[in-house]
Image (cartoon, rainbow, N blue to C red):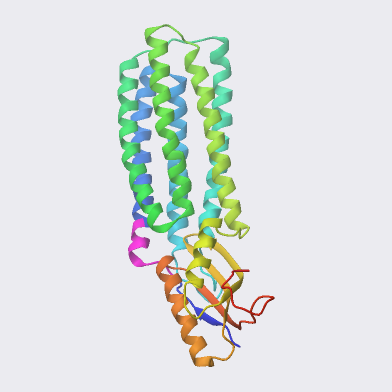
């Protein structure tokens, strides 16, 4: 019996627009923060503030890579890339993790002399004001990115959002560092917070790399999504069983394959109609997914009675 295929090469147009808008917003915010943090660092000489400046420079580089990767991932499938270009996203995310890890090593190197010869921080009020502005701008960007991720499940934007959300905590830590150095004279707090920020950056780099590698290695979708797929398939009155469920993601697009089991006495036309209906349900639940369903006759369990169990 032949396979029945539902091929949706692209996510909905609205989702594509959202993904592009998120990449433009991230690049814009990153460049604004670079400008204001550079000004504040020149005035204060704070290492922890310099750490956030380096982080913003890498944010801008990563966001530019994301912008290009998302544009490429949203390109329609062609003769050479029948499954689309979705893996441009995890490749970009893997590149981001390397950028971010490198910045952490640079910050640790910069912090070592500050531990040996602590330096006073000047114009702390300006630095604190810039950090408050950075937190407000990053909160707005993170909120928009979270909305886009819920709509599109984009791994590249998820990676981008992960370190921008981390930046909120980092910027708050810089405020504490500036206050301790300026108000209490704890000059060692500045390099200490710089090293702490570096450790947090490494942790974010690992999370991004792990997510990207899972997608590049065609890891199955999360268990809760697989269970949702099984339940949706088995909810159809004429589907008696499901087996060989295979899933993966490539950028914003999901791929779902399974065998559904039906009464062997129904006609090929009726089996085709059932497959159509199941595919429409899965397509509604996972917009932009490519669904491949194979129909098999149901032979029953060991006792010979249908139990609608997924195997």
- State the residue at coordinates (40%, 6%): 184
Is residue 154 visible from the viewing direction of this image? yes
Residue nearest the viewer, comparing 4 with 85: 4
Residue nearest the viewer, comparing 237 with 224: 237
Quadrant hosting residue 297: bottom right
- Give percent across and percent down for residue 217: 63, 58
In the image, which residues are magenta?
Answer: 10-18
- Give percent across and percent down for residue 40: 35, 23
- State the residue at coordinates (49%, 62%): 228
Magenta run includes residue 12: yes
- Give percent across and percent down for residue 112: 58, 18
In the image, residue 141 sits, relative to residue 78, either above or below, namely above
Residue nearest the viewer, comparing 172 with 126: 172
- Give percent across and percent down for residue 166: 45, 35
If the image is split into quadrants, where does the C terminus sit?
bottom right
- State the residue at coordinates (40%, 33%): 168
**Is 41 situated left or right of 199 in this image?**
left
In the image, residue 310 sits, relative to residue 39, either above or below, namely below
Magenta run includes residue 140: no
Quadrant hosting residue 308: bottom right
């Amino acid at each position: 019996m032949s396979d029945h295929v539902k091929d949706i090469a692209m996510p909905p147009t609205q989702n594509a627009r959202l993904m592009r808008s998120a990449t433009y917003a991230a690049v814009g915010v990153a460049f604004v923060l670079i400008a204001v943090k550079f000004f504040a660092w020149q005035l204060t000489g704070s290492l922890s503030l310099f750490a956030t400046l380096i982080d913003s420079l890498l944010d801008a580089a990563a966001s530019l890579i994301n912008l290009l990767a998302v544009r490429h991932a949203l390109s329609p499938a062609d003769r050479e890339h029948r499954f689309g270009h979705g893996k441009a996203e995890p490749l970009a995310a893997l590149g981001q993790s390397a950028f971010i890890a490198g910045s952490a090593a640079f910050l640790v190197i910069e912090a070592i002399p500050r531990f040996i010869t602590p330096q006073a921080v000047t114009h702390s009020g300006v630095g604190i004001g810039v950090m408050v502005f950075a937190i407000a701008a990053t909160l707005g960007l993170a909120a928009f990115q979270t909305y886009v991720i819920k709509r599109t499940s984009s791994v590249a934007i998820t990676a981008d959002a992960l370190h921008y959300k981390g930046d909120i905590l980092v910027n708050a830590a810089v405020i504490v560092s500036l206050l301790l150095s300026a108000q209490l004279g704890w000059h060692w707090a500045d390099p200490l917070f710089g090293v702490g920020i570096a450790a947090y950056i490494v942790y974010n780099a690992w999370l991004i790399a792990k997510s990207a590698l899972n997608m590049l290695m065609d890891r199955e979708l999360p268990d809760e999504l697989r269970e949702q797929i099984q339940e949706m398939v088995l909810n159809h009155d004429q589907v008696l069983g499901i087996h060989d469920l295979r899933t993966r993601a490539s950028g914003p697009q999901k791929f779902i394959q399974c065998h559904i089991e039906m009464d062997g006495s129904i006609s090929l036309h009726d089996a085709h109609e059932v497959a159509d209906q199941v595919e429409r349900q899965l397509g509604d639940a996972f917009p932009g997914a490519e669904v491949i369903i194979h129909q098999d006759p149901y032979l029953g369990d060991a006792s010979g009675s249908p139990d609608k169990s997924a195997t």
